[in-house]
Amino acid sequence: MKFFNGTALRAIVLLGTTLLVSACQAAPGTPSDDAVPASSPPSAAATQALPLITVHKSPDCGCCGVWVEHVRAAGFPVRVNDTEDMLAIKQRLGIPDEMLSCHTAEVDGYVVEGHVPVADIQRLLSERPAARGLVLPGMPVGSPGMESPDGYRQSFTVGLLEENGNVRGFSQHP
């Protein structure tokens, strides 16, 4: 039985993405304790060795900005593309509807959807699996950019988005 036609499903996904962005505007979080302080930028040589991460996000999203700082603190050069049409980017990159989050990044031929920890991105780039990239749906509390002032963390699993669109576990974060 088909509940929604394609247009209705896209509208629901767009509404869900809008709600996610609204939620992160309300509580942008604070940088994690393990992040490199902004006053200690990585060396120019280290930054040049890492590939550019292009982050597509809503211009009003606070938690996305905190995630950008998380990857910059690890030495990645970052280009931010503020856009209101996130759904078109997610569709172009083949992100399944059930895997959506508030921002989408591209790095060295891979896609990174959501608040994926930088250690997982580093592992992806090191191992170079045949896959589209990494996905972390929603906005788990305690993930980079979604830190809670009281230190509360939800456990979450980062998924590996395979070429065929299937998702399997890549890393577990307690």
Image: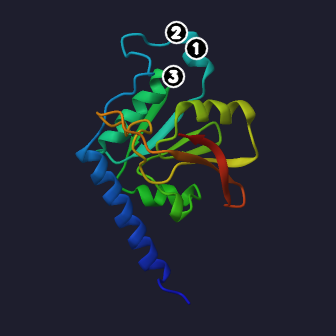
Q: Residue at x 27, y 53 (%)?
A: 22
Q: Which residue lies furthest to the left in this view?
A: 26
Question: At label 2, which amino acid type do we have?
Answer: Ser
Mark 2 burial class by Cα count in 10 Å: few <14, some 14-19, many 20+: few
Q: In the rendered structure, are the residues bearing label 3 and label 2 in contact, judged by CB atoms less than 8 Å apart?
A: no
Q: Residue 32 versus residue 103: which sits nearer the camera?
A: 32
Whether residue 57 is situated above or below residue 17 in the rendered picture = above
Q: Earlier in the sequence, mark 3 or mark 2?
A: 2
Mark 1 burial class by Cα count in 10 Å: few <14, some 14-19, many 20+: few
Q: Which residue lies furthest to the bottom in this view?
A: 1
Where does label 1 land, which residue? 46
Whether residue 130 is situated above or below residue 98 in the rendered picture = above
Q: Which mark is residue 76?
A: none
Whole-number angstrom distance, CA of label 2 to CA of label 1: 5 Å
Where does label 3 land, which residue? 74
Q: In the rendered structure, are the residues bearing label 2 and label 1 in contact, judged by CB atoms less than 8 Å apart?
A: yes
Q: Residue at x 31, y 59 (%)?
A: 19
Where does label 2 land, which residue? 43
Of the two numbered discs 1 and 3 in the rendering, the one whose residue sits closer to the viewer: 3
Q: Which residue is drawn at 46% across and 42% down?
A: 115
Q: Is mark 3 on a helix, strand or loop?
A: loop
Q: Is residue 170 left or right of residue 63?
A: right
Q: Is mark 1 on a helix, strand or loop?
A: helix
